[in-house]
Amino acid sequence: MTKILTKRFAGTSHTLSGGRTIQIDRIDLSGDDILTTLVLDFHGDLEGRILMSGTPIYEPSTQTITLSDLNYSISTGSIFFCIADWWNHDERLAELRQHAHWDIHRELQSAREILNAFLSKSQNAHMRLSGTVQTVEALGVIPAKTSVMCGLMIDGSVSGELR
């Protein structure tokens, strides 16, 4: 998940209220049995780090992962920005909650393609699998130490041959 988030968001620019612009440099993801924590390092008009945490929830109808009960904290070298953040924390939190959704449709489609490619070739000299994966659906998500694990339901057909 860290790789997916970094690929999607590292290098992206965001304009904050007040007109300041930041660019995300790096995203790290960690978690425990309940919460997922995202750490975003940024630079631009401000330099610093945003810590966001929440409980990941999978929404099957939209194929998105949402961080429910999201909260955040910001650390930067600007005392004025820290005071402004404290003053406007609830407003910024509402804005972050609106954007704390990650579409995983592409990842599910990619998993299907990888599985189909695997099933279309010999695994070794003594075994061959063949088949087709029709659908890959996420069932839910669970926070882990360095990722968010996703339970999958895979529908298709497979046959095997031992030589």
Image: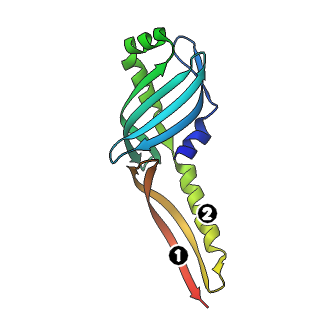
Q: Amino acid at mark 1?
A: Ser
Helix or strand or loop: what does disc 2 sit on? helix
List x then y, in percent, for residue 114. 61, 63
Find residue 116 and report its image quarter. bottom right
**Other-residue count near label 1 (Cα within 10 Å), few / some / many at <14 / 14–19 / ≥20:** few
List x then y, in percent, for residue 58. 40, 47
**Left or right for 72, reference 46:** left
Q: Which residue is mark 1?
A: 157
Depth check, front residue: 118 or 159: 118
Depth check, front residue: 148 or 67: 148
Compared to residue 125, the image places residue 150 above or below, namely above
Compared to residue 103, the image places residue 137 above or below, namely below
Q: Which mark is residue 55?
A: none
> Exactly how many numbered labels are in the figure?
2
Helix or strand or loop: what does disc 1 sit on? strand
What residue is drawn where x is 58% and y is 76%?
131
What residue is drawn where x is 40% and y is 14%?
88
Inter-mark Cα distance, 2 to 1: 15 Å
Q: Which residue is mark 2?
A: 114
Q: Amino acid at mark 2?
A: Ile
Q: Residue furthest front?
A: 77
Marks 2 and 1, the one that precedes in the sequence: 2
Compared to residue 34, the image places residue 19 above or below, namely above
Find out whether the residues at labels 2 and 1 contact each other: C-beta distance under 8 Å: no
What residue is drawn where x is 41% and y is 46%?
59
